[in-house]
Image (spheres, helix red, strand yellow):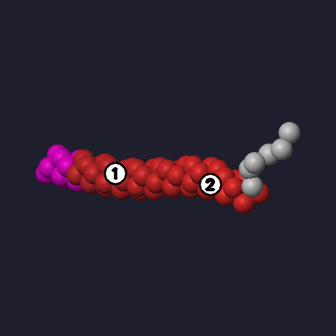
Amino acid sequence: MTSDVKPATIHAVSIVAFATIAGCGVETATTAATSAAIKKQEVDQGKKTLEQAQQKVDQAARQVEQRAEQAGAAADQ
């Protein structure tokens, strides 16, 4: 049985197959990088929201403390 396929053709097909498989890996890596960047943005936004909430809680606590002091001073008079 004699093969009519030339080594150059086999080589070319191998290169195309390899490039196709490698391209899938690049797409997967790009998708993973994009997903990681989105997650980082979500984490950063969550930290910012947490900081803002903590500031509001601190501000409310100061207001309660001030009102308590004012009420104590009014009761002393």
Query: Can residue 21 be seen?
Result: yes
Amino acid beneath label 1: Thr
Is 20 left, or right, of 72 in this rendering?
right
The residue carrying pointer 1 sits among few (fewer than 14), some (14 to 19) or many (20 or more) residues within 10 Å by Cα, namely: few
Q: Residue furthest top?
A: 1
Q: Identify the element where label 2 is drawn.
A: helix
On the image, which quarter does residue 22 sit in?
bottom right
On the image, which quarter does residue 9 sit in?
bottom right
Q: Which residue is mark 2?
A: 16
Image coordinates for residue 30, horizontal then vertical, percent: 51, 55
In the image, 38 versus 46, the foreground residue is: 38
Magenta segment: 66-77
Query: Can residue 54 be seen?
Result: no
Q: Identify the element where label 1 is drawn.
A: helix
Q: Which residue is mark 1?
A: 49
Q: Quadrant of the N terminus?
A: top right
Image coordinates for residue 71, horizontal then vertical, percent: 18, 47
Amino acid beneath label 2: Val
Whether 21 is among the magenta residues is no
Q: Residue furthest bottom?
A: 8
